[in-house]
Structures are given as structure tokens and as C-alpha cells.
Image: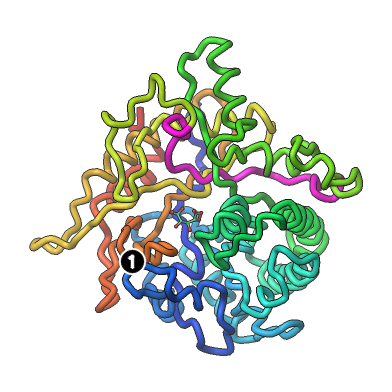
Amino acid sequence: MSFSKDFLWGAASAAAQIEGAWDEDGKCPSIWDVAGKHIKNGQDCHTACDHYHRYKEDVALMKEMGLKSYRFSISWPRIMPEKGKVNPKGIEFYKSLVAELKAAGIEPLVTLYHWDMPLWADREGGWKSTKIIEYYLEYVKVVVEALSGDVRYWMTVNEPQVFIMSAYVIGNFAPFEHAVFSYKNCLRHMLLAHGKAVRLIRETAKQKPIIGLAMAATTYIPDSEDEVGLRDAAQKSFESAVGEGSNGLYCDPIALGKASKMLRRKLSAEDLKTISEPIDFIGVNVYQPSNGMINKKGYDTSTLPKTMMGWVIDGRCLYWTIRQYYERYHLPIMVTENGMANPDTVGADGKVHDDIRVKFLDDFLSGLRRAVDEGIPVLGYQHWSIMDNFEWCEGYGPRFGLIHVDYKTQKRTIKDSGRHYAEIIRTNGENLY
Ligand code: GCO
């Protein structure tokens, strides 16, 4: 087997990280617009890649690269700048973006929540409050009614582990809280919001929707591929409390209708029924394996290359994430993010020679190919990211893009990796091994 001809080769982004235009055309601030002192070097996301004004140029570059799909998120504060109030200009923007993508033959994949909560909703308690479920659903309904004529693929939320655990417990992502005792409430609200949104999308969409969510995958690569090695690794990936230990905690209620020990008292049978509303795929965001965190023995990270985020580069983790998720949940998989940060610069020849990302693509995508060859249903691969962007509290230092962005001039340059990826797409992955 190899990649089907409709395999979704694409790239990803998120509204707060690329759009800019933070206070234009009726948008209200999001929790990231006011993150101020938490962001490195006094930077902010107010202009970012100015994609709001340059989306046509950006879609043209995607077309030049031959992308089949583009995963982006909708800015909730652009759509609903006040409680109960819809902003027509916000809707207009996404309609234009989707139209541009469709005209370029690129399938739009829409993430409904990629962390940029409107400030007004945060002031009412954000994910800590039960009210968030109703607010989120109201927003989702508006978006689905407006876009589902052209959009088929929907992701309810992106990396709930980060916008719950990191944002409300560890406090290193907006809204930067240490509300430890609210952790289980936040989790429950997110899970219910997800399940109810799935049902709402199915009831509201103008064409048959394909619905999933994007998980921050925590993957343990097996020490050996025998039965014990495989079982042991899967158990660490889904049930271990070390690291985020979050695959099972966050995804079992959704995909299996089961609560892990920690949530058993928190979720009623009724809740679980709502949360496990059937979905069509699971999205996995894959960056580095958990081995270094869980079991340092036998996994020497000192010999492995690292990205500028300090993340270990080990291409095997893409294959194992896909396989472990599929074996546990028996749902089609979409790689919703995978990529690396590097301090890329434009050379004297006007090009960006990011050899390390070219190699990264070959390493990770050969694992993707292995998964597909073994018959695992994988719907697509969305590289993170289409272009360099605002990396949350890290600001603009880490560059994750296939396209380089000069933030002073907003000039875009397709990197060598972007050209390499274009060739992989053109040959439909035939040369990956
Ligand atoms: C993520 C986020 C992205 C990050 C990327 C690199 O889902 O974590 O979706 O916004 O930029 O992962 O850290």
C-alpha cells in the first residue's frame, strides 16, 4: 500500500500566531493579546505575519507548493467580540479565506479553538466556568452556519492538555493561572464542550462533516518490538502519570467513553455519553517522544539532534504515535501538526537553506509512510507550520515555518524544506522510505 491519491498533504497554522490585525474590523482582544510580560523580548502577537491582510499572497504560496490541504483556526474574538454579538466582518474574513483556498484547490481544515479565548469570556472564568460551554457552542454554531457550505473538516479543539493543564495549572500559557483546584472542572468543561460541539456540527453543517480534534500526543517509543515491548510502550503513552501522561486522561472519555481513575468521580454516566459523541478521526500533534522524560535508561538524548526549542529529533515517534493511537481508539488518524523550530535566515543567494528541516521531513515522513504501508487509515499530514510565526511565550525567535517570514518587511520566502516538501507532495510520497 502507499498514499491514496486523495491523501491530504498540507500545513497548519493558528489564528493568534499569524493573523495580526488584533484590534481591527471589530475584533476584541484575546487572552493572548494581553499576555504582555509573559512573552519574551517584549514581543506580542498584534501584527504577527499580518496574514489577515496578506492571506491572498499566502494562499498563492500554498498553491505554488502544491498543498492539498491547509489547517487553520478561527479566531473566536473576531467572530464574537462581545457576549451574544456576532461580528459580520469577522465572518467575512474567513469566508474570503475559504473561497481563496477552494479556488486554489486546497481543502480547508478548520480548528474551532486554538487557544485565543476572547477576553470577555476569560473574565467570566474561562474554562473554569460552566458558562464557557454555552458560549463556545454559540460561537461554534455561528461558524458552522457560515462556513459549512465549503468546509467539511472540523476540529473542535487544539491540544486541550496545553490550554487546560499549562494554562490553568502550570500557568505558563494564557491566561497564566495556578488554579490547581479547578483542574478537574476545566477538564470536564472542555470535554463536554467538545462532545456537544460534535453533535451541534453534525446537526448544523450543510454537508456531511468530518469531525475530530487535535491532541498533543505524548508518545513512548517501544524499547523492543516484541509483545512485551509494545504493550509496555503503549501503556506508558496512554496511562503513565509522568510527563503529561495525558493521552488517556484526555482522549479516553472522548474516544472510548471511559474515564481514567482521576476523572471517575467527576464525570457522570450522562457526561460520558455526551463527551463520547462519535467522531470521525483523531488528530495528533507530534513533536518529540516522551522516552527521555519517562525512562531515561536506554534512551540517551545526548546523542540525538535537537531543535532550537531543545526538543529531541527522533523521527520514529511519528510512526509510533499513529500506530498507538490507532490501536487504542480504532479511528482514522490525521497528523494535525509535526515540525521543528530552527533559527533560519535568508542567505546572500536570497534562499533559506534549512537542511536540518529537510532531513527532519525525510525522517518523520518515512515513519508516516510505514504506517500507511501497514494499512493504518491516515487521512493526511499537516506540517507545522506553513510559515514562521508567533510561538506563544517564546515570541518570534523559534521559526517553525516551511516559509520564512521577515517580520520587518513581511516578505515571504519559501525555504528549501518547503521546496522539498512540495516535491514529496508532487510524487505523493513515492520516494519516502
Ligand atoms: C501546538 C500549537 C502550536 C505550536 C506548535 C509548536 O499545538 O502546540 O498548536 O500552536 O506553535 O506546537 O510549539
Q: Which residue in the protein does label 1 denote?
A: 396
Instruction: Tell me, yes or no, if residue 365 can be seen here.
Output: yes
Kindly indicate the quadrant of the structure image that contains residue 242: top right
* Residue 115 position (above or below residue 355): below
Q: Is residue 287 magenta?
A: yes
Kindly indicate the quadrant of the structure image that contains residue 29: bottom right
Q: Residue at x 57, y 26 (%)?
A: 375
Q: Secondary structure at mark 1?
A: loop
Q: Residue at x 42, y 67 (%)?
A: 59
Viewer-closest of 93 and 271: 271
On the image, the x and y values in percent for residue 233 come to 55, 23
* Residue 42 position (above or below residue 198): below
Tell me which segment is drawn in magenta.
273-293
Count of numbered circles on the image? 1
* Residue 379 position (above or below residue 298): below
Does residue 57 appear to the left or right of 372 in the view shown? left
Which residue type does callout 1 highlight?
Answer: Tyr
Viewer-closest of 126 and 288: 126
Viewer-closest of 78 and 236: 236
Query: In this view, which residue lies farthest toward the right?
Result: 270
On the image, the x and y values in percent for residue 295 come to 46, 25
Viewer-closest of 268 and 374: 268
- Crowding around mark 1 (Cα neighbors within 10 Å: few <14, some 14 to 19, many 20+) is many
Does residue 408 appear to the left or right of 132 in the view shown? left
Picture quarter with the C terminus = top left
Ligand 1 lies under 8 Å from the Cβ of mark 1: no
Q: Residue at x 62, y 63 (%)?
A: 113
Instruction: Tell me, yes or no, if residue 368 can be seen here.
Output: no
Q: Is residue 60 magenta?
A: no
On the image, the x and y values in percent for residue 290 come to 47, 34
Kindly indicate the quadrant of the structure image that contains residue 377: top right
Query: In this view, which residue lies farthest toward the left?
Result: 348
